[in-house]
Amino acid sequence: MGKHYHPENRNAAPKTGNRRFRRITGVALALCAVGAAGAGSFATVLAQNTPVTSAVIDGANHYSVSLASTDADRLLQEAGITLSDDDMIVREENDSGITVTVKRKITADITVDGKTHVVEGYTGDTVGQLIEEAGLQVDALDEVTPSPSTQVWDDVDVSITEQKTVYIADNNVVRSYVVPAGTVSQAVQAAGIALGKSDSVENGKKQVENGMVISINRVTYETTKKTETVPFTVQEQQTDDLPVGETKLQTKGQNGKKQVTYRTKLVNGKAVKTEKIKETITKEAQEQIVLVGTKEPEPEATAASADGVCPVPYTSVISGSCTAYTGDGTTSTGMTPAVGVVAVNPDQIPYGTKLYIASPDGSYVYGYAVAGDTGGAMMSGQALCDLYMNTEGECIDFGRRVMNLYILS
């Protein structure tokens, strides 16, 4: 059984068993008293004054000493080994002789997560013993450098890196990795996964947790070209060559063509955004030109009508309730809405019929007009005619009135 001696405990009984060592001072070595139960053979050897082959171990150096003595001091002296104040010796007996091991004081700096712990030990200690002496806990996944089983013979720097098991999803494939504790981005780097310029890691700044799933977004771009139609525009030109309310197609419009280049962003193979990056006209569109008549009808140089209200001859007159309307848009016949274009029931007054409209007593004169539109009130019989006016205010002032519609010849 091995016996541990400290220089200052020369007169103390040897201690046995394995234990962690504390700081020791003193330079003398304790004498080894051979126990009655376990040292009979050595007593006999000494009595016969027969040399005993003993071993002295100092770090990596082994010395063989042939000396008829159980005195550790004499064995060390014979081996030429001197001790410092903090050294320790361990004396072991067996049937073949005595082994004296010199354990030198060493210091270990153990770094965990950037914090350094200083602990003292002895040569021959393992890194695991030094970590235990520092009171530190090491998980099975943690990386220890040098390894816990490594024996140390001098001052040593030990690092403990906390490690986690994570699952990384990359291109729809999930694999497990053991990585150092840190951020998610650092874990991906430690796993040896290369990222492209546009790739990203979800929750990159979040701290890694054991068992967490880390997703990598792989970004690619796809370019496509399409041929698209360029619609033609319509320009209206007024002309007094046509009566009010009439239109004429002068130039027919034609659609053009263009080639458009799009770039689509894909994340893990799925399109998330498409933008137009280039447009080239391959065929110019041709504008459509429509002539719009502005010419007012001229009264005929004939006698006034019998009632003195209509200044030109007419074939018949229809009297009824009339309303007014205004606004942009397109009439039922395609005419541009303008003063002089009125809405009627085409079954009663056909489209294109020329009219002169005034109140029966001649106090309100709308003037010359053409039937070019229709509306629900006319079709249902609620109104005889709807007169187009330039403003909403004129419509309000007109309200609803009984008017005569003179059908011109």
Image (cartoon, rainbow, N blue to C red):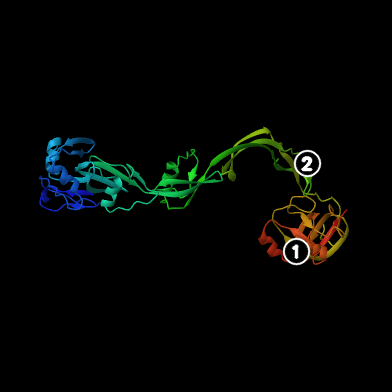
Foreground pick, 21 / 120: 21
Identified at 57% across, 39% down, the residue is 221
Q: Please, is residue 241 above or below residue 361 in the view?
A: above
Q: Mark 2 points at which residue?
A: 249
Quick check: can you spot residue 64?
Answer: yes
Tell me where residue 205 appears, x and y as whole percent: 42, 49
Q: What amino acid does circle 1 point to?
A: Thr
Tell me where residue 300 appears, x and y as whole percent: 84, 50
Q: Residues within 10 Å of mark 1 (few under 14, many from 20)?
A: many
Q: Earlier in the sequence, mark 2 or mark 1?
A: 2
- Tell me which corner region of the image, top left, top right, bottom left or bottom right, holds residue 349: bottom right
Identified at 59% across, 45% down, the residue is 270
Tell me where residue 1 appears, x and y as whole percent: 23, 49
Q: From this viewpoint, which residue is outermost toward the right?
A: 315
Identified at 18% across, 48% down, the residue is 40
Task: Name the mark nearer the viewer: 2 or 1.
Answer: 2
* 107 relative position to 204: left or right: left
Q: Residue 270 carries which label?
A: none
Check disc 1 and report its element: helix, strand or loop.
strand
Q: What amino acid does circle 2 point to?
A: Leu
Q: Name the residue under label 1.
A: 323
Report, in whole angstroms, how far the alpha carbon at label 2 lies from the one at label 1: 31 Å
Residues under numbered marks 2 and 1 in contact, where contact means CB atoms less than 8 Å apart: no
* 283 relative position to 217: left or right: right
Check disc 2 and report its element: helix, strand or loop.
strand
Foreground pick, 405 / 112: 112
